[in-house]
Image (cartoon, rainbow, N blue to C red):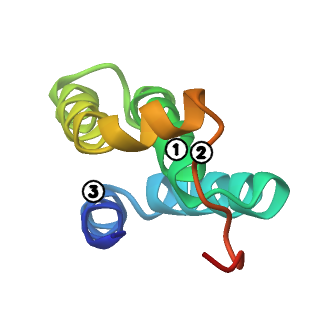
Amino acid sequence: GGKGVATALGVLVGLNPWLGLACLVTWLLMAGVFRISSLAALTTAVLAPVYAGLLMGWDNTALTVLVISLLLVYRHKSNLIKLVNGEEGRIGARS
């Protein structure tokens, strides 16, 4: 887990370093507060297109970021179910 999120972050940094930084900070804040990696990833995926639009304009780049985000959310569908059911593991918790 996490390879897709890390790859997406690398793409976002390549598109715009400020976009990558905004997403990294979002992930770190969410992970630090809630201690749930998938929640941090999903929140960041939802906000990434907004950040892209604000930083670079609402053009094809923001649309590309939206597509990447939708793919990430789709790949995390099982995590979404676990989150809703309160079954998602926390960072640092023993299984």
* Disc 1 to disc 2, C-alpha distance: 20 Å
- Label 1 near label 3: C-beta < 8 Å? no
Label 3 Cα crowd, 10 Å radius (few <14 / some 14-19 / many 20+):
some
Residue 86, position as x, y percentages in the image: 65, 37
Depth check: 43 or 48 in front?
43
Is any part of residue 55 visible from this angle? no
Q: Residue at x 67, y 71 (%)?
A: 91
- The quarter in which the C terminus is drawn is bottom right
- Secondary structure, mark 3, is helix
Q: Amino acid at mark 1?
A: Thr
Depth check: 58 or 66 in front?
66
Label 2 Cα crowd, 10 Å radius (few <14 / some 14-19 / many 20+):
few
- Secondary structure, mark 1, is helix
Q: Is residue 57 left or right of residue 85?
A: left
Q: Residue at x 27, y 66 (%)?
A: 14
Task: Read off the residue under disc 3.
Answer: 15
Q: Is residue 70 left or right of residue 9?
A: left
Task: Read off the residue under disc 1.
Answer: 44
- Secondary structure, mark 2, is loop
Task: Read off the residue under disc 2.
Answer: 87
Label 1 Cα crowd, 10 Å radius (few <14 / some 14-19 / many 20+):
many
Residue 45, position as x, y percentages in the image: 42, 40
